[in-house]
Image (cartoon, helix red, strand yellow):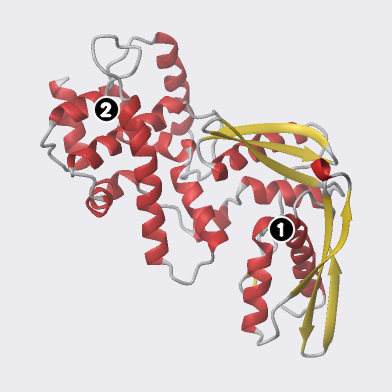
């Protein structure tokens, strides 16, 4: 363990005041002679999320909430953090007695070696959660050792977390939720993602034309949605074309936008054009209280007249408004307003 602590400190370029913290951070629950990393992983998970949220909030003052959420989710996902662990060989320094876990990690490491570029949303093999847990536990150990100084934590772990994904990176490989909505729209199908909580775990269920397709879980809501969308795309690929067309950016609006961020994009576009902000109305309110469905419309006043678009039926007003906004953006593109 002493050599593991030295190696981990070298990776972090940080010397611990309390090296017992790092020993604990590098101990899996299968190793019974010492406390495991679970407590440190718990606080490290939250600390990384807040640290990277602060970074994007300060570094990109012009980004709206939807874009900030996408960046945070991509940079703290299990897939992303697992690749951090692989890149720095952190699993080699973990005390454990888990042969089956070793096999899963080895399979993932081999699959990552075949990747040509960094993968924001997952590759050939699902990332073992233990790898992300190690990164979070090590970050938690640093956070405690620096007396819960979040800014100091970020200075120490930023290099560990590189590469930090940017919006440009996410456009090269579209986000799974984006692809899911794009694919279903292309195939004339309606998609809905419903979130709920199972204790402290966020669960996201994907429904296509009202039928359940896939589910995803995570401690973070955004990542649960990513996991659910990814699983849905795998299942849908059996009977429909799930390939997405090349992103085309026109005046800041791309054709593979995420439907849940469409309102923000339409609002921003109207501001750039110096048009009045979009006006949304609820056109239909259907079903009993426990199965409510909504249809919303949006109107925008352009330099040459008023445009009106009605969206698809959704389980939440917010989603129904986003649906109307996304269809309005497509209409603007087709009419060469963009």
Badge 2 crowding class, 10 Å Cα cut-off, few under 14, some 14 to 19, many 20 or more, is: many
Coordinates of residue 221 in the picture (x, y in percent):
56, 43
In this figure, which residue is indicated by the disc labeled 2?
Answer: 25
Name the image quarter holding residue 143: top left
Q: Residue furthest front?
A: 289
User: Dot 2 lies on which element?
Assistant: helix
Residue at mark 1 to residue at mark 2: CA–CA distance:
41 Å
Identified at 44% across, 70% down, the residue is 61
The image quarter containing residue 241 is top right
The structure residue drawn at horizontal position 35% and vertical position 48%, both measured from the top left corner, is 162
Residue at left offset 82%, top offset 42%: 291
- What's the residue at 71%, 78% (across, down)? 338
Identify the mark at residue 266; answer none if there is no mark. none
Q: Nearer the viewer, residue 43 or 56?
A: 43
In the displayed structure image, the side of residue 333 where residue 308 appears, left or right:
right
Residue 26 horizontal side relative to residue 167, left or right = left
**What residue occupies the far bottom of the structure in this picture?**
303
Q: Nearer the viewer, residue 87 or 2?
A: 2
Residue 156 x, y percent position in the rendering:
23, 48
Among numbered discs 1 and 2, the one appearing first in the sequence: 2
Secondary element at tag 1: helix
Q: Which residue is mark 1?
A: 318
């Amino acid at each position: 363990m002493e050599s593991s602590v030295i190696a981990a400190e070298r990776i972090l370029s940080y010397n611990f005041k309390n090296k017992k913290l790092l020993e604990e951070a590098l101990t899996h629950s299968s190793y019974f002679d010492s406390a495991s990393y679970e407590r440190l992983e718990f606080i490290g998970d939250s600390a990384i999320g807040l640290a990277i949220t602060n970074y994007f909030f300060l570094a990109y003052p012009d980004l709206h909430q939807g874009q900030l959420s996408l960046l945070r989710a991509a940079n703290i996902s299990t897939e992303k953090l697992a690749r951090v662990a692989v890149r720095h060989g952190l699993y080699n320094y973990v005390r454990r007695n888990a042969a089956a876990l070793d096999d899963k990690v080895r399979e993932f490491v081999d699959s990552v070696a075949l990747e040509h570029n960094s993968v924001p949303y997952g590759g050939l093999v699902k990332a073992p959660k233990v790898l992300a847990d190690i990164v979070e536990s090590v970050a938690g150990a640093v956070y405690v050792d620096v007396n819960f100084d979040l800014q100091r934590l970020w200075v120490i772990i930023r290099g560990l977390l590189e590469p930090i994904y940017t919006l440009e990176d996410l456009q090269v490989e579209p986000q799974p939720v984006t692809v899911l909505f794009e694919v279903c729209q292309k195939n004339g199908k309606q998609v809905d993602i419903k979130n709920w909580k199972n204790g402290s775990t966020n669960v996201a269920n994907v429904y296509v034309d009202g039928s359940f397709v896939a589910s995803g879980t995570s401690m973070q809501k955004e990542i649960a949605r990513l996991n659910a969308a990814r699983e849905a795309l795998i299942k849908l690929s059996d009977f429909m074309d799930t390939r997405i067309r090349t992103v085309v950016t026109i005046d800041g609006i791309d054709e593979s936008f995420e439907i849940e961020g469409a309102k923000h994009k339409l609002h921003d576009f109207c501001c750039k054009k110096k048009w009045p902000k979009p006006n949304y109305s609820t056109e239909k309110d259907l079903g009993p209280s426990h199965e409510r469905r909504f249809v919303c419309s949006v109107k925008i006043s352009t330099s040459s007249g008023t445009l009106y678009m009605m969206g698809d039926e959704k389980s939440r007003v917010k989603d129904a408004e986003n649906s109307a906004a996304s269809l309005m953006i497509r209409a603007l593109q087709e009419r060469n307003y963009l």
